[in-house]
Amino acid sequence: MTEQSRDEPEDMEPTIAPPQTGNPAVDDALLELADLASAPLEEHHDRLGYVHAALQEALDRPDEDQSHNAEPA
């Protein structure tokens, strides 16, 4: 065991910052998932439900400003 790993529990994964999408609702949803592995199991269902609903709403209501920046097909 290295000196650095003694300070951290072995079953904990390092937290990685989620990517920024430019859509605040999607960014918030991804942030909810960033530390899911370290959250109590009892919270997983509610957090995943929140993320699912937030992402579904983002898909149902695309941001008008971002759609203008997309390249034509």
Image (cartoon, rainbow, N blue to C red):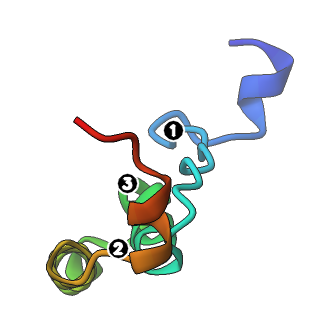
For the residues marked 2 and 1, what is the alpha-carbon distance in whole angstroms?
14 Å
Q: Badge 2: how crowded within 10 Å, few (<14), some, or many (20+)? A: few
33 left or right, relative to 48: right
For the residues marked 3 and 2, what is the alpha-carbon distance in whole angstroms?
8 Å
Image quarter where the C terminus lies is top left
Q: Secondary structure at mark 1?
A: loop
Q: Secondary structure at mark 2?
A: loop
Residues at discs 3 and 1 in contact (Cβ within 8 Å): yes
Q: Which-is-in-front pick, marks 3 and 2? A: 3
Taking depth in this image into account, of 36 and 52 the one nearest to the observer is: 52
Residues at discs 2 and 1 in contact (Cβ within 8 Å): no
Q: Is residue 38 above or below residue 27?
A: above
Which of disc 1 and disc 2 is earlier in sequence?
1
Label 1: which residue?
A: 13
Residue under the point 14% across and 80% down: 60
Q: Amino acid at mark 1?
A: Glu
Q: Amino acid at mark 3?
A: Ala
Q: Is residue 54 above or below residue 55?
A: below
Q: Amino acid at mark 2?
A: Pro
Q: Badge 1: how crowded within 10 Å, few (<14), some, or many (20+)? A: few
Give x and y (percent) for residue 50.
Answer: 24, 85
Residue under the point 60% across and 47% down: 15
Number of marks in the rendered image: 3
Q: Is residue 22 above or below residue 46?
A: above
Label 3: which residue?
A: 37
Residue 40's disc is 2
Q: Secondary structure at mark 3?
A: helix
